[in-house]
Amino acid sequence: MRIAVTTPTGTVGRHVVNGLVRAGARPLLLMRDPARLAPALAGLVEPVAVDQGDEAAVVAATAGVDTLFWVDPPTRTDDPVAAYARFGAHAARAVTANGIRRVVFLSSVGAERRSGAGEIDGLARTEQLLDDTGADVVHLRCGFFFSNLLMELDSIRSGAIRVVLPVDHPMPWVAPRDIAEVAVGRLLNPGWAGRVVQAVHGPADLSWEQAAAVVADVTGRPVRAERIADERMRDTLAGAGLGPGLVEAVMGMSTGLRDGFRPEQSRTAATTTPTTLAAWCQDELRPLL
């Protein structure tokens, strides 16, 4: 089995690579800059320079691949939905051209809406494009990454994390390394077929109020979640340099999932992962504050 991994130095991808290496696989790594490869992985993986925005390069690099871990790479364009759809089209073309039998796609809770969820709409389009290839595909519908808190370091230091969701609104929160563990299991397991949707919900649904309390307890810093008006958040994002389209795409990931939305898949043993927010904060967040 030849396994290709995209975004192998990313938030989830780096854990996927390490998990595959520990399992004895020698993954092919599609990366913009192979020089970023961790020295410890030298000789254990096959890095190849590929821009996922270059369809021909993606097709050429995945020749002979049996199984593909696909992540739409992050983009700062003013139309990220269109960008993700374009990346998804490149993945679908590679799958079709090279007869790739299996794909594990990093999607998101909210992709089931298909539209109205901001950037997540681009992931929904990628799901559809991969489904249309006829390959066996697993869509990992992941909850809110714990690692998103790393973008809130200044807010945590100031004592208030500002959000547009109701602060008592529960949602799935998950550790990236747990997502990777599920992905590696799917990549190495030959016992599934067809189109599969697997939610990755983390250990428990948490509201922002509860999450802030965990952060405060672990870090020793008093911090609270504060709901602000949508327009105020738009102004904040625009002030950080985001264009109008990107502002709306970011906003939609919250506003599209707050009014009566429930994930398509419920919490079960198959969708629940073990790492708690407190454990993640102890290991990843506290050393940075």
Image (spheres, rainbow, N blue to C red):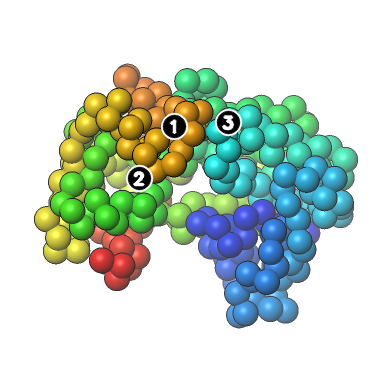
Q: Nearer the viewer, mark 2 or mark 1?
A: 1
Q: Quadrant of the N terminus?
A: bottom right
| Distance between the alpha carbons at the discs numbered 3 and 1 | 10 Å
Label whose residue precedes the other's in the sequence (3 or 2) = 3
Label whose residue precedes the other's in the sequence (2 or 1) = 2
Residue at the spot of label 2? 173
Residue at the spot of label 3? 79
Residue at the spot of label 1? 247
Label whose residue precedes the other's in the sequence (3 or 1) = 3
Instruction: Mark yes or no: residue 100 visible.
Output: no
Task: Decide: is 39 above or below 180.
Answer: below
Instruction: Mark yes or no: residue 37 visible.
Output: yes
Tell me residue 5's x, y (percent).
68, 56
| Distance between the alpha carbons at the discs numbered 3 and 2 | 26 Å
Tell me residue 99's x, y (percent).
85, 43
Judge left or right: residue 1 versus residue 84. right
- Dividing the picture into quadrants, the one containing residue 39 is bottom right
Tell me whether the residue at label 2 lies in contact with that at label 1, contact meaning CB atoms closer than 8 angstroms: no
| Distance between the alpha carbons at the discs numbered 2 and 1 | 23 Å
Identify which residue is drawn at 33% across, 32% down: 235
